[in-house]
Amino acid sequence: MSNAHPAFELVTSATIESLGVQVEEYRHHKTGAQHLHIAADNPENVFLVALRTVPQDSSGVAHILEHTALCGSEKYPVRDPFFMMIRRSLNTFMNAFTSSDWTAYPFASQNRKDFDNLLDVYLDAVFFARLDPLDFAQEGHRLEFAEPGNTDSELVYKGVVFNEMKGAMSSVTSQLWQTLSRYLFPTTTYHHNSGGEPADIPKLSYQQLVDFYRSHYHPSNAVFMTFGDIPAAEHQAVFEEKALHKFEPLDKTIGVEREDRYLAPVSVEEHYPVSGDEGLEEKTHIVLGWLLGDVTDLEESLTAHLLTGVLLDNSASPLMKLLETTDLGTSPSPLCGLDDSQRELAFVCGIEGSERERGDELEKQVLAVLEDVAENGVPHEQVAAALHQLELQQREITGDGFPYGLQLILTALTGATHRGDAIGLLNIDPILEKLREQIKDPRFIADTARKLLLENQHRIRLVLSPDDALSGRREAAEKARLAEIKARLSDGEKEQIVQTATALLDRQQREDDASILPKVGVEDIPPEMPKVEGEETRLGKQKLTRYSAGTNGLVYQQLICALPDLTEEEKQLLPYYCQALTEVGLGDKDYLQVQQWQASVAGALHSYTSSRTDIDDLQQLSSYFVLSGKALTRNQAPLTELMQATVEQVRFDELPRFRELLLQTLARREQGVVGNGHALAMAAASAGYNRAAFESHATGGLLGLRQLKALVRGLDSDDGLEKLTAQFQAIHHKIAAAPRQFLLIGEEDKLPDYSRALAPLASEAVEASAAPSEDFDPHRVGELWLANSQVNFCAKAYATVPMVHEDAAPLAVLGGFLRNGFLHRSIREQGGAYGGGASHDSNLGVFRFYSYRDPRMAETLADFDASLEWLASGRQKDEQVEEAILGVVGALDKPSSPAGEAKKAFHSALYGRTHAVREEFRRRVTEVRLEDLKCVASTYLKPENASTAVVTGAQGREAGLELGLAEEKL
C-alpha cells in the first residue's frame, strides 16, 4: 500500500538493512518531478532539491544562478532571505552547491517548526526567485570605476562569484582538474568550468541568467530528496501546495549525453601561474586520466571502485607504490583515484613535483605496472582487503561533517540526476556479494585492469608546468580588456555604470523587513543539551571508558596518553612523527606489508595529538597523544593486535620511507593554503597571545609550513634522515612509556567482549603528572604572508578569556551578531569577498575577525574596526541578539554520528569540558543581552590591542607593506 500524497505515485521502494533505512522513490503525476525519500528513525530531518544544470560554457551561469536565486523570491521579497534564515533558524546544516551537472539546495534541522520554516523559504527561492538585476550585479559580476563616481578612473570587475572563482582557481589542484576535464570531456558539459572561469564570467549577461533559470529551474527537471522521520506524504503535501501545482510539464528533457570516445590516447601540455620568486624546479604535475563507464551502471561502477582500491588504496597497492617511490616526482598527484561525480567515471593517477620532460617516462612506468597487473594479477589478499574497505564504507554511519542523512542523499543524487538507479547506489550489498564471488577467480582483477585501462584508448596525458609570467599576462589581458571596454563607452554609458553602483550600494544599505520571514526563537531551544553517557571501568591498572552506540557493526577504539615532556624541537616534529607512526614498518614487516595488514583488518588507523587550555586558565595547556582505529566487529581483536604492534614494534630504519612521507605532507600542506587561507590568517594573528595559540600556528599554521619546508630541505642526505628518525625514535620512546587510558565505542552487547580483547594494550605505567606548561610572553602580531593566491585572506585578533569566564558567552554571541548585522553586508555584499565574519575561540581565548577570498585588504581591516563603531552606535535591536544566540546554540547542539557523539563527549571531558560545564556555558549563551555585547566589546576589542595577519599573493604585497605589516615568506 502506497503512503504517497495523491499528487504522487510510488515507483519503487527497498529496505536497506545495512543502513537501517527504507528508501522510497516517487513520481509527481503532473510534472514528473522525482522524490526520493529515505525513511529513518532519526530526528535530524534533511531536505534537498536538485536541478539538472548543464552549462555550455565557462561563464559560471549555474553557479551565479545558485547565488542569485537565494536573493529574494515572490513570497519573501527581501534582499537576502538565505542569510537571514541562517540567523532565524536552529538548522544543523544549510547551504547550496553547484556541481558540474547539478545545482542543489540542502538543509537539515532537528526542530520540526524550523524544518517547516526552511522548507517554505527554500521552495519559494528555488521555484519563484525574483532574480533582481542588482543581485546579479552583486553576486555575479559588474563593472565599476576604481574610484567611485570618477569616470576618469580605471574600470574594474567586481562580484562575489567573480572573486570566489579567482580564489578557487588560485588552487593548483583546481586548475589541474579543470584542465584535465577539458580534454577528458571534449564535447559534453564537463568540458566547461561550471563554477566559472574568471576570464569568462564577465561574458555572462543578465538575460542569459534569466533564460537559464526558466529552462532549468522547473519541477520536471528537479529531484526532491528527503531523509528522517517525517513521512514522505507530509513532505509531498508541502511540495504540492507551495510549488508543484503551479507548473505544467516541461517540454524538454535536460541531461548529459555520453562522451564521444577518442580512438587513440591524447598527450597535452598546459601551464599554471606561479609567483616569480618561487622558482620553477620540480613544480610540474603529470597526470594520466581514463574515461570509463556510465556511473548509473552499478556493477561496472563498483568494479571500477574495487580496481581503484587494488591499484591505489595504500602504499602497498601496485600503482600507488610506483607513484610514491618513483624518482620522477616528489609525491602522488592529489587527483589520484576514481571520480564518480559525473555521468561517466574517470580514473586518474599521476605525480607532482616533477619536470615537463618526464611525461613520457612516467607514462611508460604507469603502463608497465598496469601491464604487470593484467599479466600476473595481484595477490588475493590485496583484492579482498580492497573489497573489505568498500564494505566498511557501506556500513559506517558517518555524520561528523555533513549530516548523515545528507551524505546518503548525496550518494544517491548522482544516480537520480542521470535517471539511473538511485536506490541501487545506496544498496550496494548485492553487488558486494557478487564481487566476493568474482574475486575468487585470480584473473578477475587482471582482466578488469586490461579491459578498463590498458585497452581503453580514451586516455589523456596532461603535463601542467609552472609559468612565472602567466599571472602577469593574465592581469595585463584583464586590464587591456577593461581599457578597451572603457574606450568604447559613451558618456551616458559611463554614467549608467556610476548609477548602477550607487543603486546597488543603496540596496545593500537598505534595511529589509525581516518579519515577513518565518523564525524560531529562544523559546524553541531545547532546555537541555543531548547527553551521551559513558561507563568508566579498568583495563589492568588503567582507565577504560566505554560508550554504547548504534555503530552498525563497527567498533571504534583509542589509546590515549598525556603528552610527556618534550623538547621544543621534538614539539615541532610531533605532527610528522604522528603521521609516520602508522605508515612505516612494524617488527619483521616492512611498511608495504604493514599497509596490507592495515587494509585487511582496519577501516582506519592513525595517530594525532591535541591540545587545549584549561577551562579557567589560558596559560595552562594540556596535551594528549591518541592512537585511533576502527574496524568491523569481526576484526576487533586483529585491530587490537595491530595497534599493539604499532606502539611496541614500530621501525625507524626505513629512511627513504620517511622522506616520502614528509614530501607528501609538504605537498598537501602547500595545496591547502588557498582553500584554508582565512583559518591560516586567523592562526597567525592569534599566535602572539598564549602558548596554545602559538603552537597551533607553529604546527598546523603557516609558520609550521615554513618550518616543514626547511625540514624537507635537510633530508637530501642520509645524515639528515638518520638525525630525523633518531628524533622520532626519542619521541616514540617517551610516548610509549607514558601512562595510558582507553576509549571504546560499539554496540552495547559487544562491549564486554571488546574490553577483554583490548587487554594486550594495557601497560604497567601508572598515572603521572603531565608535562609542565611553559611561560609565554604575550605580544602583538602584524604579519603579511605571501602565497600563490589571486585574492586576500584578512584577519584581526584580540586576547580575551577562557570558557568558564562570565564574558565568554557574550563573546561567543558577539561574533555572530557582528557578522549578521555589519560584516556580511560590508565585506561580502559591498566588498565582494566570498565570505567574512567574526568568532570567539574560548579554547585559545581569542576573538577573531576574518575575510575569505577577498579582493580588498586595507578596506576590510577598516571594516573590522567599523563593526565595533556600529555596535557602539546603538542602532541595534534585541531580535538581532536572539538571532546570534540561535547560531551559537545551533552549533553547540549540532549532532554527529553515534560514534562521533561519544568521541566528542569523551574528549571534551578529558579537557575539563564536561557535559555540566558545556551545558552551563550554553545556558549563559541563551541569557546574553545587547548590553552584554557592548560591554565585552569595549573591554576586550580595543583597536590598539589588535593583532593583524593577511595572506595574499604578489599583487597584495605592496598594499600590505603600506599597512606596516611585516613580510613573511613561506
Image (cartoon, grey):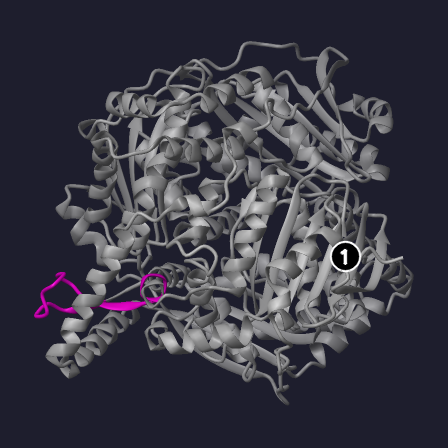
Question: Which residue is located at x 60 percent, y 27 percent?
Answer: 526
Q: Secondary structure at mark 1?
A: helix
Side of 464 where 762 appears, left or right: right
Q: Position of residue 412 (x, y in %)?
A: 70, 60
Q: Position of residue 871 (x, y in %)?
A: 26, 32
Q: Is residue 503 above or below residue 689?
A: below
> To which quarter of the image does residue 200 belong?
bottom left
As drawn, the residue found furthest toward the bottom would be 263
Question: Which residue is located at x 13 percent, y 81 percent?
Answer: 490
> To which quarter of the image does residue 832 belong?
bottom left
Residue span colored magenta: 136-156
Question: Which residue is located at x 39 percent, y 33 percent?
Answer: 879
Q: Residues within 10 Å of mark 1 (few under 14, many from 20)?
A: some
Q: Is residue 208 above or below residue 703?
A: below
Q: Which residue is mark 1?
A: 426
Q: Position of residue 383 (x, y in %)?
A: 80, 58
Count numbered badges in the picture.
1
Tag 1: residue type?
Leu
In the foreground, 635 or 260: 260
In the foreground, 960 or 656: 960
Side of 345 where 138 appears, left or right: left
Q: Is residue 140 magenta?
A: yes
Q: Is residue 119 magenta?
A: no
Q: Position of residue 712 (x, y in %)?
A: 43, 46
Q: Is residue 207 visible?
A: yes
Q: Is residue 207 above or below residue 733?
A: below
Side of 241 where 612 appears, left or right: left
In the foreground, 50 or 189: 50
> To which quarter of the image does residue 491 belong?
bottom left
Q: Is residue 82 above or below residue 608?
A: below
Q: Is residue 461 visible?
A: no
Question: Which residue is located at x 66 percent, y 51 percent?
Answer: 407
